[in-house]
């Protein structure tokens, strides 16, 4: 077995152990008062999980639309929010829908950078500040994975999936910015927060 495979196996085992420890810690936490509130489902957000191992964020509030991109093959990206947070980041949340007649794979949406390891992702997305003449790329973690939705492959006709991408925040004075995904027309959006 090569060193690379051994390292991957160790990393996977460590991640599994950490996940198990966190699950036990969360399960052990409780208020202890025995009072249960009725669960009407109003505060729950579901996380879409796919067998392809893609990272998923909780589904965006699809009742709100701040922009829409229509691309080739009947692919539509509906933008729901672009929120600036106190940590200096902007998170764009959207839904990708396949209105075409063929399976859709987001392979063309990934970044062309060789260091980025995320395939079938939206790692090639960017925010463009035309007035400030700056482009903001999707953030990456220390392992070269994008801080964005991955596993965007095999999207069936009439299927929708949540999408997110996190960027460094432009200066507070920038309110309007263009959102771009490769092969799609850009759309102007307003940052909130």
Image: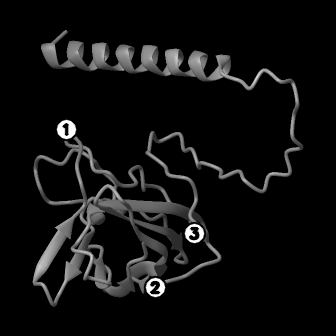
Which residue shows up at 44% across the image and 45% down it?
54
Camera-side residue of 130 and 3: 130
Which image quarter holds the N terminus? top left
Residue 12, compared with residue 110, is above or below; it is above
Instruction: Give yes or no for contact between labels 1 and 3 (Cβ–Cβ under 8 Å).
Output: no
Label 1 to label 3: alpha-carbon separation = 35 Å
Residue under label 3: 157
Label 3 to label 2: alpha-carbon separation = 22 Å
Label 2 to label 1: alpha-carbon separation = 31 Å
* SS state under label 3: loop
Which image quarter holds the C terminus? bottom left
Left or right: 186 with respect to 129?
right
* SS state under label 2: strand
Instruction: Give yes or no for contact between labels 2 and 1 (Cβ–Cβ under 8 Å).
Output: no
Residue under label 2: 67
Q: Position of residue 59 (x, y in %)?
A: 58, 59
What colour scheme was applied to this rendering of the protein? one colour
Q: In the rendered structure, which disc, 1 or 3, sits on the residue that comes first in sequence? A: 1
Report the mark closest to the observer, 1 or 3: 1
Report the mark closest to the observer, 3 or 2: 2
Which residue shows up at 12% across the image and 46% down it?
115
Q: In the rendered structure, which disc, 3 or 2, sits on the residue that comes first in sequence? A: 2
Q: In the rendered structure, which disc, 2 or 1, sits on the residue that comes first in sequence? A: 2
Camera-side residue of 155 and 163: 163
Camera-side residue of 172 and 92: 172
Give me the disc on residue 142. 1
Residue 1, compared with residue 83, is above or below; it is above
Left or right: 156 with respect to 189?
right
In terms of image quadrants, where is residue 122? bottom left
Residue 91, compared with residue 22, is above or below; it is below
* SS state under label 1: loop
């Amino acid at each position: 077995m090569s060193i690379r495979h051994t390292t991957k196996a160790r990393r996977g085992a460590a991640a599994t152990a950490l996940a198990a420890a966190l699950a036990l810690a969360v399960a052990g936490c409780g208020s202890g008062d025995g009072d249960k509130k009725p669960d009407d489902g109003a505060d729950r957000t579901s996380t879409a999980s796919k067998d392809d191992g893609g990272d998923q964020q909780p589904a965006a509030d699809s009742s709100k639309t701040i922009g829409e991109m229509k691309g080739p093959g009947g692919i539509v990206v509906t933008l729901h929010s672009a929120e600036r947070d106190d940590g200096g980041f902007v998170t764009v949340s959207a839904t990708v829908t396949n209105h075409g007649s063929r399976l859709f794979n987001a392979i063309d949406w990934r970044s062309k950078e060789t260091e980025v390891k995320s395939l079938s992702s939206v790692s090639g997305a960017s925010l463009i500040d035309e007035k400030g003449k700056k482009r903001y790329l999707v953030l990456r973690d220390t392992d070269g994975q994008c801080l964005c939705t991955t596993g965007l492959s095999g999207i069936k006709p009439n299927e929708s999936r949540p999408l997110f991408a996190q960027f460094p925040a432009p200066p507070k004075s920038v309110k309007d910015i263009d959102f771009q995904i490769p092969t799609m027309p850009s759309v102007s959006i307003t940052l909130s927060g």
